[in-house]
Image: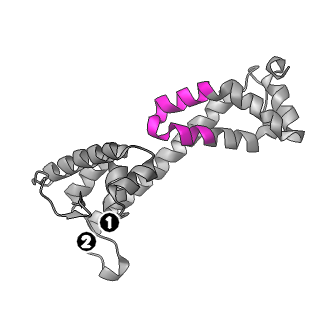
Amino acid sequence: MESLLSDARILSDSVSEPARFSSLYERHLRAVASYVARRAGPELSEDLTAEVFVRAFRRRAVFRDDHGSALPWLLGIANNLIADHRRAERRRLQMLRRLARTGPVSSESGVAVLAPELVGELLRLPAADRDALLLVVWGELSYAEAATALSVPIGTIRSRIARARQRLGAAIGQPADPAAPTVNGESHA
């Protein structure tokens, strides 16, 4: 029966019966997830897709049926989320760049200042490699803990960090040293 209802009807009914929203979710999940994965990458797609439906649920009372389907509305929400995410990431990376330019910071602040060329290369790293590296180096997680935090196998963390170290080392003219100091058997260079 629910499969015969229009998206507009499902959304309208879900205002008084929230459980009805699940039909819309099931109907459009695959299309939204596919679009988000293509735009934002597989590492972010699950979280951003979930947030699309959270926002749609919160705004379901204002849905306008302009196209006979809620999919354009949902993909519009996805576009806004992706843009929000990219702006936030850009602000974080610009802050890193500003920190590199300001010079030494007092030791009480706990903020390490990086050389500008190192920050530039850190900004150019793929997000997945940068996330893995920063979880281990700045977050002081073990490789196993970083793997848990990112929901990936530990071997993936090792590969990402090795690539990141190689690129960062090359950027400052020092190739990654396989014999770099380790903590708990894991390199933290």
Vertical arrangement, residue 18 with respect to residue 146, above or below: above
Vertical arrangement, residue 113 with respect to residue 45, above or below: below
Q: Residue 127 occupies which quadrant of the picture?
A: top left
Residue 44, numbered circle: none
Residue 103, numbered circle: 2
Can I make out residue 5 in this image?
yes
Residue 31 on the magenta span? yes
Say whether residue 33 is left or right of residue 138: right
Q: Amino acid at mark 1?
A: Leu
Q: Residue 78 occupies which quadrant of the picture?
A: top right
Q: Which residue is at 20% across, 47% downward?
A: 167
**Residue nearest the observer in this picture, 162 or 113:** 162
Image quadrant holding the N terminus, namely: top right
Q: Which residue is at 82% across, 17% downward?
A: 4
Secondary structure, magenta segment, majority class: helix
Q: Residues within 10 Å of mark 2 (few under 14, many from 20)?
A: few
Say whether residue 35 is left or right of residue 105: right
Q: Magenta stretch?
A: 30-50
Q: Which residue is mark 1?
A: 99
Q: Which residue is at 79% across, 30% downward?
A: 64
Say whether residue 181 is left or right of residue 51: left
Q: Position of residue 177 (x, y in %)?
A: 12, 54
For mark 1, give the secondary structure.
helix
For mark 2, give the secondary structure.
loop
Q: Amino acid at mark 2?
A: Gly
Can I make out residue 125 in this image?
no
Q: Residues within 10 Å of mark 1 (few under 14, many from 20)?
A: some
